[in-house]
Amino acid sequence: DLSGLPPTRQVVFQIDLRPGAAPVAWAPYRLAPPEMKELSEQLKESDKGFIRPSSSPWGAPVLFVKKKDGSF
């Protein structure tokens, strides 16, 4: 159900980098089992269109922060 979301916008975002800048690569760190479960659930949301796939060579690690009630 997408009734609570605003309509999609056709906006192209771009960050201009310095010439010659290259992504830095390192192995991903391990997630605790509850974090891995939450990541799996979040990735399932991508099938619904909430998260769009990226073709960027740049990325960022996943960081989970618990809410006051203990959920992610």
Image (cartoon, rainbow, N blue to C red):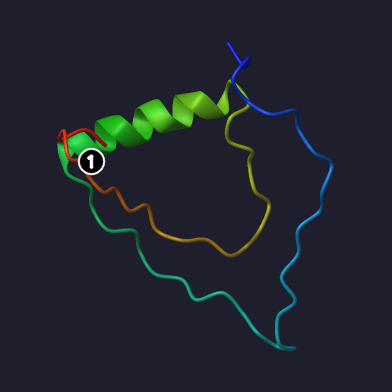
Asked where in the image residue 6 lies, by quadrant, the reply is: top right
At 76% from the left and 32% from the top, the residue drawn is: 8
The quarter of the image holding the N terminus is top right
Give the secondary structure at mark 1. loop
Residue 26 x/y as whole percent = 39, 69
Work out which residue is located at the far top of the displayed protein and give it: 1
Residue 58 x/y as whole percent = 58, 65
Figure check: 1 above or below 6: above
> 72 or 16: nearer the eye?
72
Figure check: 1 above or below 28: above
At 80% from the left and 38% from the top, the residue drawn is: 9
Residue kind at label 1, given as amino acid type: Lys
At 70% from the left and 88% from the top, the residue drawn is: 20
Residue 21 x/y as whole percent = 65, 84
Q: Is residue 58 left or right of residue 43?
A: right
Figure check: 57 above or below 52: below
The quarter of the image holding the C terminus is top left
Q: Which residue is mark 1?
A: 67
Figure check: 18 above or below 24: below
Work out which residue is located at the far bottom of the displayed protein and give it: 19
How many marks the image carries: the answer is: 1
Residue 39 x/y as whole percent = 35, 36
> 52 or 13: nearer the eye?
13
Badge 1 local density, few (<14 within 10 Å), some, or many (20+)? Answer: few
> 14 or 5: nearer the eye?
5
Q: Is residue 28 left or right of residue 9?
A: left
